[in-house]
Image (tube, helix red, strand yellow):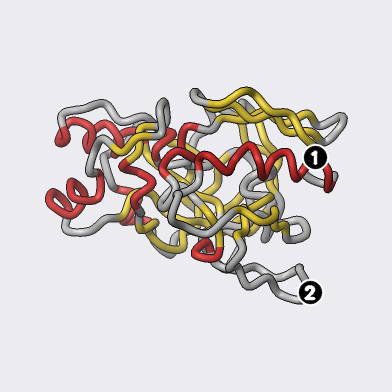
């Protein structure tokens, strides 16, 4: 995205709107509550998911999904019959010994982020370059699924910003906490196969497995590619 409008107390528009529940997921009766990512099928336990790419048609509400080993699928997640087509499509990518995909879960106007509070993730290109150099392999940004990527500055200096407020474009954020990473980052997003132990590298070189930081939007506004980060 070249430009996006953010809203106070909300997640990134279009980010994690739906999550794939399985037959053992405990869905709240209200179906309006945030529940943790451990309740869903996801890239950390289904590596092949990481190679799924998508596009969204805002005019008719359909999503088109692509994967290197599957035929392309276009469906409307709000249509029950078409949802069944999606569940059938995604099944071969799920762990053979794990739970079966059951439904798509959605919570109002916020995304199902890994944090209970509505968060936006902020990651650094310079940190990615340094980690890639230490590993000896160029890491794709898609491994880390960031909302906002910054370029310039020092590698991993974003961890020094915790608790601070920043402005990008006309939106203001508060930096909340580091993002602890999971097995999904080990997976090559081009083919869905685990090929680099990113967690071991983070622990070996930095003593933790964090990459990027979570923020909260405290003042809504528009941001676009090329905006500078300004400290309040």
Q: Report the front residue among 135 and 84.
A: 84
Quadrant where the N terminus is found in the figure: top right
Residue that mark 1 sits on:
82
- Residue drawn at x 56%, y 26% as measured from the top left: 70
Which residue of the protein is positioned furthest toward the bottom in this rendering? Answer: 29
- Residue drawn at x 35%, y 32% as measured from the top left: 188
> Which numbered disc, 1 or 2, marks the residue closer to the eye?
1
Q: Are marks 1 and 2 in contact (CB under 8 Å)?
A: no
Q: Report the front residue among 232 and 4.
A: 4
Mark 1: few/some/many CA within 10 Å (<14, 14-19, 20+): some
Residue 132, compared with residue 47, is above or below; it is above
Q: Estimate the x, y position of residue 81 in percent, counting from the top left.
A: 83, 43
- Residue drawn at x 35%, y 54% as measured from the top left: 181
- Report helix, strand or loop for mark 2: loop
Q: Estimate the x, y position of residue 37 in percent, counting from the top left.
A: 52, 61
- Residue drawn at x 36%, y 29% as measured from the top left: 140
Mark 2: few/some/many CA within 10 Å (<14, 14-19, 20+): few
Residue 225, compared with residue 154, is above or below; it is above
- Report helix, strand or loop for mark 1: helix
Q: Report the front residue among 128 and 218.
A: 128
Q: Which label's residue is closer to the chain start, 1 or 2?
A: 2
Residue that mark 2 sits on:
30
Report the side of 44 relative to 147 (left or right): left
Residue 11, compared with residue 23, is above or below; it is above
Q: Estimate the x, y position of residue 171 in percent, counting from the top left.
A: 63, 46
């Amino acid at each position: 995205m070249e430009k996006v409008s953010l809203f106070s107390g909300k997640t990134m528009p279009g980010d994690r709107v739906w999550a794939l529940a399985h037959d053992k997921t405990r869905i709240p009766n209200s179906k309006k509550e945030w529940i943790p990512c451990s309740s869903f099928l996801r890239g950390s336990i289904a590596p092949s998911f990481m190679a799924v790419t998508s596009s969204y048609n805002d005019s008719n509400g359909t999503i088109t999904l692509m994967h290197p080993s599957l035929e392309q699928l276009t469906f409307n997640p709000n249509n029950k019959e078409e949802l069944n087509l999606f569940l059938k499509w995604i099944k071969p990518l799920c762990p053979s010994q794990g739970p079966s995909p059951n439904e798509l879960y959605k919570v109002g106007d916020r995304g199902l982020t890994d944090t209970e509070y509505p968060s936006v993730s902020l990651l650094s290109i310079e940190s990615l370059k340094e980690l890639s150099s230490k590993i000896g392999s160029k890491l794709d940004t898609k491994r880390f699924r960031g909302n906002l990527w910054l370029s310039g500055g020092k590698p991993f200096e974003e961890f020094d910003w915790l608790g601070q407020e920043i402005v990008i474009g006309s939106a203001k954020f508060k930096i909340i906490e580091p993002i602890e990473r999971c097995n999904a980052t080990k997976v090559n997003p081009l083919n869905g196969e685990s090929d680099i132990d990113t967690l071991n590298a983070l622990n070996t070189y930095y003593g933790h497995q964090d990459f990027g930081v979570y923020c909260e939007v405290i003042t809504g506004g528009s941001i676009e590619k090329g905006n500078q980060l300004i400290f309040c």
